[in-house]
Image: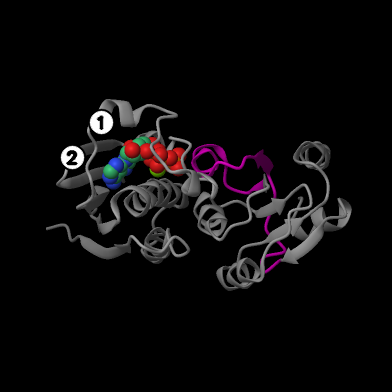
């Protein structure tokens, strides 16, 4: 009965200067759908952190954002190196970012914790050498 | 109500680009590590930073800050200015330290 809409984005892993573009577009789309500004802020920040991680750590990937009546679901999928120890990666301050990336202001090890903080649920499925799928949900009701 | 244009004038800051001069300012956040800013800055804050690479624009837009304030005499490059203008992001600058700027803004809002 309830209709949902899905946006799909390709995240380019080679271009740092345009990193974050998908998240900025999501913000725009959600605004057009009339979603509450605080919800938009949470969704777009969580997505940004995931998008940047795909650029920095996984060479790019795909993002899907589905808006239903009940919630907004963000799925980030990459075929990067995977995360060996998810618990460790979730810790504030843990980062494997290179010096080059750190000089741009990334690499504080706060991205995954932010994603958890700003969403109502978060699930990470990752296999070393295969890739990473992260699903996050923000409730609308 | 404190706005970006008013702050600029009262605090004698340099306007780099100001496509949204009437944006309200409600607070401030100092930080250079992007994920800290994403996690801690609030909507309508002044974001005081020494970071001036192009990635600050997406952060400013998504964290929904009122403006970016480049401190310590940091100079933005042309590409940053051009893109900020297109994206509607306010950028100010000053030679003062981040601490001095935070103190100044704290006294004004
Ligand atoms: N999509 C991914 N593929 C492979 N490894 C990842 C991925 N996302 C995160 N990681 C690993 O988890 C670590 C922690 O990620 P997190 O986003 O918290 O910090 P960061 O990206 O290193 O720094 P920050 O997000 O603060 O700029 C990363 O340093 C990286 O080792
Ligand atoms: Mg990260």
Q: How many marks?
A: 2
Residue lying at 23% horizontally and 50% vertically, measured from the top left? A80
Mark 1 nearby-residue class (10 Å; few <14, some 14–19, many ≥20): few
Label at residue B43:
none
Could you tell me if residue A138 is visible in this image?
Answer: no
Label 1 element class: helix
The residue under label 2 is: A126
The reply, left or right, for residue A74 in relation to residue B67 is left
Quarter of image, res A138: top left
Instruction: Name the chain under label 1.
Output: A
Instruction: Name the chain under label 2.
Output: A
- Between residue B62 and residue B31, name the one nearer to us: B31
Label 2 CB, ligand 1: below 8 Å?
yes
Depicted B22 relative to depicted A106: above or below: below
Mark 2 nearby-residue class (10 Å; few <14, some 14–19, many ≥20): many
The residue under label 1 is: A86
Residue lying at 61% horizontally and 70% vertically, measured from the top left? B79
The reply, left or right, for residue A45 in relation to residue B7 is left
Q: Quadrant of the C terminus of chain A?
A: top left
B24 is within the stretch colored magenta: yes
Mark 1–mark 2 CB contact (< 8 Å) = yes
Residue lying at 67% horizontally and 46% vertically, measured from the top left? B49
Question: Which stretch did the figure color magenta?
Answer: B18-47
Label 1 CB, ligand 1: below 8 Å?
no
Depicted B98 relative to depicted B77: above or below: above
**Protein image colouring:** one colour
Where residue B31 appears, x then y in whole percent? 62, 40
In three-dimensional space, the C-alpha distance between marks 1 and 2, rounded to whole angstroms, equals: 8 Å
Depicted A99 relative to depicted B8: above or below: above
B29 is within the stretch colored magenta: yes
- Judged from the image, the quadrant occupied by ligand 1 is top left
């Amino acid at each position: 009965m309830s209709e949902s809409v899905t946006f799909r984005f390709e995240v380019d892993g080679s271009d740092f200067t345009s990193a974050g573009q998908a998240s900025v577009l999501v913000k725009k789309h959600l605004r057009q759908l009339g979603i509450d500004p605080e919800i938009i802020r949470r969704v777009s920040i969580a997505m940004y952190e995931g998008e940047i991680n795909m650029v920095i750590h996984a060479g790019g990937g795909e993002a899907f954002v589905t808006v239903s009546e009940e919630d907004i679901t963000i799925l980030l999928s990459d075929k990067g190196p995977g995360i060996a120890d998810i618990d460790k990666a979730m810790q504030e301050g843990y980062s494997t970012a290179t010096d080059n990336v750190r000089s741009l202001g990334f690499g504080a090890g706060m991205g995954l914790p932010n994603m958890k903080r700003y969403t109502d649920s978060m699930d990470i499925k990752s296999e070393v050498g295969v890739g990473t799928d992260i699903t996050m949900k923000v409730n609308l009701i | 109500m404190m706005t970006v244009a008013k702050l600029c004038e009262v605090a004698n800051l340099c306007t780099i680009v100001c496509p949204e001069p009437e944006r309200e300012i409600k607070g401030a956040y100092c930080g250079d590590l992007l994920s800290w800013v994403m996690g801690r800055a609030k909507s309508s804050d002044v974001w005081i930073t020494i970071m001036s690479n192009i990635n600050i624009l997406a952060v400013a837009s998504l964290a929904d800050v009122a403006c970016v304030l480049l401190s310590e005499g940091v100079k933005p490059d042309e590409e940053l200015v051009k893109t900020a203008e297109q994206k509607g992001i306010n950028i100010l600058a000053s030679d003062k330290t981040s601490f001095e700027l935070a103190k100044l803004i704290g006294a004004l809002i």
